[in-house]
Amino acid sequence: MEMNKWPDQTLVEEFVKGNATCFDILIRRYKDRIFSYIYYTLSDKSLAEDIFQDTCIKAIHSLLDVRYRDSGRFLSWITRIAHNLIIDHYRRARQLETTSADGQTALLNSVRYAEPTIEDQMVSSQIRKDVRKLIERLPDEQREIILLRHYGDLTFKEIADLTHVSVNTALGRMRYALINLRKLVKEHRVILSM
């Protein structure tokens, strides 16, 4: 069988045995999802690239030290590494009292979609900022699940593994997050369409 078609677990095992190409295949397989999660959480491309590289390095060290225990769930495992590095970044930033120019955390300043006209871009950007501000008002567990699901593009199974809860708990948190987000949209009279 061609290496690109090997399951994640086989690639991990072969990497640990010394075949470096196997790790490259794993990263190519999941790079877009991992990087998207990091980027949309941080809203800073340069910082996201740094965290992505740190994630890969930490994953390599963990695999070589035989600390990988999530047999068959490589994406969840490496996303958890990225998630922990993001948390470490925010802790360091908080200690340094780092904020953006408008006084909000960088998490609120993401521009996710480009629109054809400048006016559309401005409106779209404002909508996203408004929604991000509302997401920040959610309880931590609800905010985390929205970021993982909608910005990290993880499945509920992957989220459950990453956050060490059951799939039903992850689904319940998403349900309550959406209910609370709808309430916040009404309370703050946020317009969600152009």
Image (tube, rainbow, N blue to C red):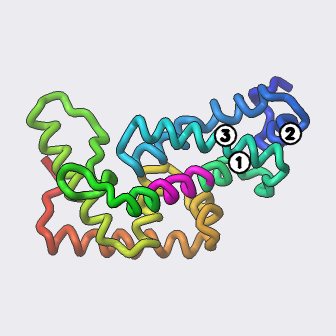
- Please provide the residue range marked out in magenta: 81-89
**Residue at 18% of width from left, 44% of height from top?**
124
Specify the amino acid type for callout 1.
Answer: Phe
**Numbered disc 1: secondary structure:** helix
On screen, residue 158 above or below 52: below
Residue that mark 2 sits on: 16
Where disc 3 sits, the SS reads: helix
In the image, is 144 to the left or to the right of 13?
left
**Residue 72 is one of the magenta-drawn residues:** no
Query: What residue appears at the point 62 percent right and 52 percent down from the top-left corner?
Result: 81
Number of marks: 3
Residue 13: image x %, image y %? 86, 41
Amino acid at dot 2: Val
Establish if 80 lies above or below 173: above
- Residue annotated with mark 1: 74
Asked whether 193 or 25 is in front, the reply is 25
Query: Residue 177's spot in the image, x, y percent?
Result: 38, 71
Q: CA distance from mark 3 to mark 1?
A: 15 Å
Q: Secondary structure at mark 2?
A: helix
Inspect the image, locate mark 3, and give the three-letter code of the amino acid beneath it.
Ile
Question: In the rendered image, which residue does mark 3 sit on?
Answer: 57
Q: Which residue is depicted at the point 83% across and 48% down?
A: 65
Q: Along the polypeptide, which appears first: circle 3 or circle 2?
A: 2
Q: Residue furthest left?
A: 119
Q: Nearer the viewer, residue 35 or 120?
A: 35
Residue 135 location (% of width, % of height): 31, 64
Name the foreground residue: 152 vs 54: 54
How many residues crowd mark 3 within 10 Å: few (<14), some (14–19), many (20+)? few
Residue at image point 64% right, 53% down: 76
